[in-house]
Image (cartoon, rainbow, N blue to C red):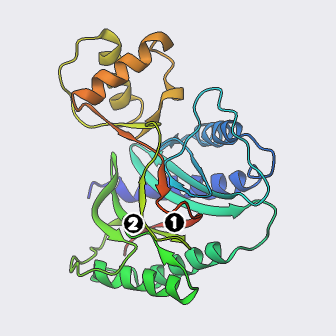
Amino acid sequence: MDENFEKDWNKAKEISDVVMEFSRGLVRKGARVLDIADSIEQKILSMGAKPAWPVNISINEIAAHYTPVANDTLVLDENDLVKMDIGVQINGLAVDRAYTVCIGKKKHPMIEASQKAVDETLKILKPGVKVCELSEVMENTVKEFGFNTIRNLCGHAIERNEQHALPSIPNAKNTNQTKIKEGQLIAIEVFVTDGIGWVMDSGQELIFKHVADRPVRMWEARRLLEIAKKDFDRLPFAKRWIKDVPIMKLDLAINELLDNGSLHGYSPLKEQSNAPVAVTEETKFVK
């Protein structure tokens, strides 16, 4: 671990505390998801950090990876189960947090289940605990509420410039004997549903991430790759963030970079049986 790791983590965590509280005041009936995302991202920037990825605002059966596009007209409605996934980064080191709101209701049993599962898992998250032990607590807690976890989604470690590092920590019981180490940054993330508990890609890719530097033909593709590395610290970004590439060429540039493996794209993840999903996530520096 580099010498500034804990210092950057502490600063990002402190800023994320303020941003999370700020964000809750924006999630209400009639709010436009684009306005919510822009407001949160600008708040992060105003506090001297950067968004670690585009704010994810995933509704009902969409479990994760929905971020608004430019001119997005989607608005929140009564009874929507809204998942807010927010990342704050300092020098490429991210704090990953998420919560769920049911519009118009103070409580929802799936939100309670995901929150308790995270709380109970954090209690045992310490050096030497095994991945399988963490996952068992997650699934057992959710089952007590009568719901399912999403079996193909995971918590994860976080490293500098890498938001999803190993080990992955599945929401379902497993036999992974990997032990958590002192000094690791671990995101405990629990997805809860009353559906079958499996997600699949749904719709177009909305979020992109630098993977590798490979030769490209278009100048716009080369410029986008440079932005992905330097401006976004190799962390995920949204097309609506790109200001330096002409809009008429942006899709062509992204497609070239996806085709040659320079970028990876993320589509929204939908619960396979179209059932609603709740999530809670917290990041902990393991000591």
Q: Quadrant of residue 115?
A: bottom right
What's the amino acid at mark 2? Answer: Gly
Q: Position of residue 176 (x, y in %)?
A: 23, 78
Rounded to the nearest whole Å, what is the CA distance between mark 2 and mark 1? 8 Å
Q: Earlier in the sequence, mark 2 or mark 1?
A: 2
In the rendered view of the protein, which quadrant contains the C terminus? bottom left
Q: Position of residue 97 (x, y in %)?
A: 53, 59
CB within 8 Å, label 2 to label 1: yes
Q: What residue lies at 44% left-to-right and 80% top-to-bottom?
A: 138
205 left or right of 218? Answer: right
Q: Position of residue 121 (x, y in %)?
A: 45, 81
What's the amino acid at mark 1? Answer: Glu
In depth, the one of 268 and 20 nearer the eye is 268
Q: Quadrant of residue 7?
A: bottom left
163 over 151 or under it: above or below = above
54 over 250 or under it: above or below = below
In depth, the one of 183 and 195 nearer the eye is 195
260 left or right of 265? Answer: left
Which residue in the rendered view is the most extreme toward the front?
Answer: 273
Residue highlighted by disc 1: 281
Which residue in the rendered view is the most extreme toward the left?
Answer: 215
140 left or right of 5? Answer: right
- Please rate how many residues cluster around mark 1, counting C-alpha atoms within 10 Å: few if below 14, some from 14 to 19, many from 20: many
In the rendered view of the protein, which quadrant contains the N terminus? bottom left
Q: What residue lies at 37% left-to-right and 77% top-to-bottom?
A: 172
Q: Quick one: SS at disc 2?
A: strand
Q: Quick one: SS at disc 1?
A: strand
Residue highlighted by disc 2: 155
167 over 39 or under it: above or below = below
